[in-house]
Image (tube, rainbow, N blue to C red):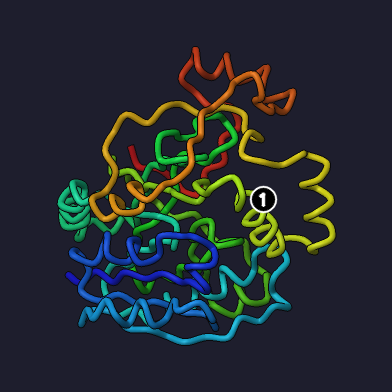
Amino acid sequence: MKISGFSYVRNGFDYGVPFLEAIQSILPICDEFIVVVGNSNDGTREAIEQLNASKIKIIDTVWDMNLREGGKIFSQQTNIGLDALSGDWCFHIQADEVIHENDLLKILNAIKENNHNKKVEGFILPFYHFWGSYNYIRNSRRIHKHEVRIFRNNIGARSYRDSQGFRKFKSIENYNNNTEQGKKLTVKKIDAPIFHYNGIRPPTNFRKKAELMGSFYKSEKDVVKELDERKYDWDNVDRVIEFKGTHPALMQSKIAAQNWNYIYNPKKAVWKTKDKLIQPIEDLLGFKFGEYKNYKLIK
């Protein structure tokens, strides 16, 4: 049984994402790791090379900026990495995601235990969505709780939408022509959280990053207008709670280097009217109404 890890990144330092930590976090249980590196000018590629790991292979790409809107470029880059994998299982980690070292054996054992059970096509992992600093995680109904990050190779899986998850298709032609919606993967859950660090950045860079990421879904003009209307800053969030767990060891240097102090102020919380009404009910019932699930969970 062979496990192939893969990721994509472009100008990782400029975007402030822990791409090096992401790669290294799952490398111990991977037999190979493919990194699709877009044309970067901030030393991203050189930094990956300096990891000097025999398992790592870099694929160089030039991003087609005509695929920016809708996040299509993210799926394209994901699929380039996916097509290069030779393992039995594929483990996708994004550039702002890190796995805790204490969970690697749990993940590896789950894959081994289900390797011969063809009904299990993949696994979902829960998420910790950090916001503002390393001390808070967002926990409202607006965040996605689980995503497919591990799945079997050679089942026709392709990146779905903006690299949100994966579905399997009858043919690549159908996928490329958008003539097939694809089938959701049948998966099991592994209680090994993904530490999602996308929401962590100093106040001076908070809006800048939102503008950069938003430009991959809408025109830059529309993004700026939307952020202006929302008065977007790090207080522009519905709800976060204090994180009381431990971070991956790989992240300790970044955590120690944090030079700003974020404190969640519920009085400044920004809620959509519908969410503000429904959230207390969901909290009471422990159930999310209308939750989007891009998978079929095997109980």
Residue 295 pos. (x, y %): 47, 49
Q: Pick the residue in front: 263 or 55.
A: 263
Q: Name the residue under label 1.
A: 207
Picture coordinates of residue 292, whole percent (x, y):
57, 41
- Mark 1 packing: few (<14 Cα in 10 Å), some, or many (20+)? some
220 left or right, relative to 46: right
Q: In which quadrant is the N terminus drawn?
A: bottom left
Decide: is 151 above or below 32.
Answer: above
Residue 240 placement (x, y as % from top left): 51, 29
Height in image: 243 above or below 191?
above
Q: Quadrant of residue 111?
A: bottom left
Q: Residue at x 54, y 63 (%)?
A: 15
- Judge by depth and name the residue closer to the eye, 1 or 31: 31
Q: Does residue 183 sit above or below 233 in this rendering?
A: below
Residue in the picture at 26% in, 38% down: 246
Q: Which residue is drawn at 35% across and 77% down?
A: 48
Tell me the quadrant of the picture where the C terminus can be found. top left
